[in-house]
Structure formats: C-alpha cells, structure tokens
Amino acid sequence: MSYVTVVDDSPAGTVANLDRLMTEILPEPDGLVARYAGVADGKLCVVALWTSREHAEAFMRRDLGPGLRQLLGAAPTTPPRSTGFEVEHSRVR
C-alpha cells in the first residue's frame, strides 16, 4: 500500500539544499514515487509518496541522517519531525 511522509520543518532548510541532498549526496531512494517541497512560514516542508511504509522508514533510518550530516557538516540534534500515513484514498488528475 502506498505511504506518504510529511516533514514540516526539514533540517535541509532550503529548497536548494534539498536539491543538493537528493541529487548530489544521496542515491535515488528505493520506493520513492514523488516528492513535493516548498517553504511555508519560513520552514522547508517536504511531502513524499512512497510505494510502501517500509521504503519510507528504511530511507529515514538508513540514508537521511548521514546525508544531512554530509550536507550540513553535522547531524541534526533531533530527527526531523515527520508524520506518515497509509494512503487509503487518492485522486490523480
């Protein structure tokens, strides 16, 4: 079942940093279907659609921390606050 993650204050901080993280530092994540990012209230928000919860959790657990450490020079002191949910209904136009 598809899975969505929502990070409402990404430690990457900017869209440019997110682009660098996802194109230069980290390999293409397994199971990533789509990613949307933008700034709201001065914070970088990232929404990602995954093929499964397992893919999302593996990326967050295995890849994201080391990638952020390489991008920022140090790992964030706390993991990004994220929410995830199984997709029960979707509509694509």
Image (cartoon, rainbow, N blue to C red):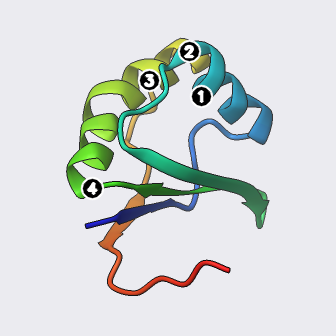
State the CA–CA distance, disc 4 to disc 3. 26 Å
For numbered disc 1, what is the local secondary structure?
Answer: helix
Q: Position of residue 62 (x, y in %)?
A: 27, 27
Q: Residue at position x 57%, y 47% from top? A: 10
State the CA–CA distance, disc 1 to disc 2. 6 Å
Quarter of the image with the N terminus in it: bottom left
For numbered disc 3, what is the local secondary structure?
Answer: loop
| Few, some or many residues within 10 Å of mark 2 (<14, 14–19, 20+) | some
Earlier along the polypeptide chain: callout 4 or callout 3? 4
Question: Is label 1 or label 4 in front?
Answer: 4
Left or right: residue 1 versus residue 32 is left
Q: Which mark is residue 75?
A: 3
| Few, some or many residues within 10 Å of mark 3 (<14, 14–19, 20+) | some
Question: Is label 3 or label 2 in front?
Answer: 2
Left or right: residue 54 versus residue 84 is left
State the CA–CA distance, disc 3 to disc 1. 16 Å
Residue assigned mark 4: 52
Is residue 43 at all visible to an observer of this figure?
no
Earlier along the polypeptide chain: callout 1 or callout 4? 1
| Few, some or many residues within 10 Å of mark 1 (<14, 14–19, 20+) | some
Left or right: residue 54 versus residue 33 is left
Residue assigned mark 2: 25
Q: Amino acid at mark 4?
A: Ser
Quarter of the image with the C terminus in it: bottom right
Earlier along the polypeptide chain: callout 4 or callout 2? 2
Residue assigned mark 1: 22
Q: Amino acid at mark 2?
A: Ile
Earlier along the polypeptide chain: callout 3 or callout 2? 2
Q: Amino acid at mark 3?
A: Ala
